[in-house]
Amino acid sequence: MAFLCAASFCGCGGKEIVLPYDGNTTNSSFRFESNDAGNIAASFAESLCIPEGDITAGDEIAEGADAYGSAGFFDIKNRKTMYSRNVYTRMYPASLTKVMTALVAIENCDMDKVLRADESCVVNEADATKIGLKAGDSMTLDQALHMLLIYSANDVANLIAVNIGGSVDGFSRLMNERAARLGATNTHFVNPNGLHDDNHYTTAYDMYLIFNEAVKYGKFIEIISMTEYSTVYKDQNGDPVDYSCVTTNRYLKGQVTAPLRATVTGGKTGTTMLAGSNLILLSKDSSGNSYISIVMRAQSADILYEKTNKMLELLT
């Protein structure tokens, strides 16, 4: 089943601005060099943070800025960019891709819809995170989203794609169309899981746009804040399969402590050899205001969390 969300990108005063997807552009939509650039920038400014280049307040991590590719820290309530480095530079997103997979799924499908796996859902890569889905296995979308966002199962991402988009390619088109409507026009997805492909890329800023939309949904926040999950799905014969997983987020696992004034709600990790270590995070300050942080292409997980904490230290 292919279902195309009918939402459009709206500007100030109810003026609709259609943003067609262009995978070849190197600019985010509000930075287009055209007569409409001012209107588009103004419409973004109404509800979003817009970095005007690098903003690097605060101390850098000990390993230096070359230890990661890009980073951004955004104050959602006040629409303020608190930190920005290379946020418009293309990066491989790895499993940060699954934020968009979840967003498209939540918007296009009921949580109790039963998803059934076929051969195209199976992931055979030895080092890929997966639950070992086989053709004929089935589960609800609600179960699948938990496995997708908590454990980062790549075969479950394929399961969602095939059942909502008709195929991996069909779902990828939905992802790209949704990204374009969000203004994330420096993004191109070719799969729902983030397994490497040279034509599968995004930017830190585009991921902020996507994540900022996803956290508008209570189901998404509920899942990304969970430390563990257990459920029972069915195999091809209808027999129960017990499943349990633990989050990949070191903050939620208690392996990394956030600065005193920051409380981590949850987020999504992503790691491949070419993408490096990546993390997008939803946090709150002592007054309950929400923030989005993102670090991409860190050289290690330790550097990833060290850089994230340096940005969280900017909270007062």
Image (spheres, helix red, strand yellow):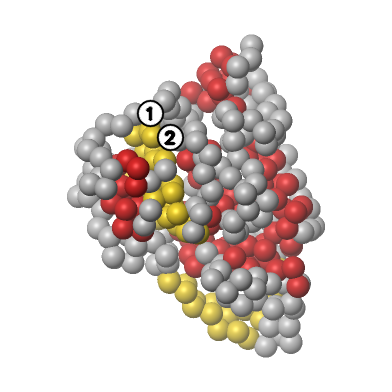
The quadrant the N terminus occupies is: bottom right
Task: Tell me the residue at 73%/58% (across/down).
Answer: 168
The quadrant the C terminus occupies is: top left
Residue 238, above or below 224: below
Classify mark 2: residues with Cα within 10 Å, few (<14), some (14-19) or many (20+).
some
Q: Could you say which disc has been placed on residue 86 in the image?
A: 2
Give the mark nearest the N terminus, 2 or 1. 1
Q: Quadrant of residue 183?
A: top right
| Residue 75, x across and y down, in percent | 37, 35
| Residue 99, x across and y down, in percent | 54, 52
Compared across the picture, whether 268 is left or right of 4 comes to left
Q: Do the residues labelled 2 and 1 touch (CB within 8 Å)?
A: yes
Task: Tell me the residue at 31%/32% (across/down).
Answer: 56
Instruction: Give the structural element (helix, strand or loop) at label 1.
Output: loop
Residue 21, above or below 100: above
Q: What residue type is labelled 1?
A: Asp
Q: Could you say which disc has been placed on residue 162 in the image?
A: none
As measured in the structure, the alpha-carbon distance from the residue carrying label 2 to the one carrying label 1 is: 7 Å
* Residue placed most toward the observer, 113 or 271: 271
* Residue placed most toward the observer, 65 or 48: 65
* Residue placed most toward the observer, 112 or 177: 177
| Residue 241, x across and y down, in percent | 60, 84
Toward the top, the furthest residue is 35
| Residue 49, x across and y down, in percent | 44, 30
Compared across the picture, whether 184 is left or right of 279 comes to right
Task: Tell me the residue at 53%/57% (across/down).
Answer: 95
Residue 163, above or below 35: below
Residue 1, above or below 186: below
Q: In which quarter of the image is residue 134?
A: bottom right
Compared across the picture, whether 86 is left or right of 91 comes to left
Task: Tell me the residue at 67%/33% (across/down).
Answer: 24
Residue pointed to by mark 1: 54
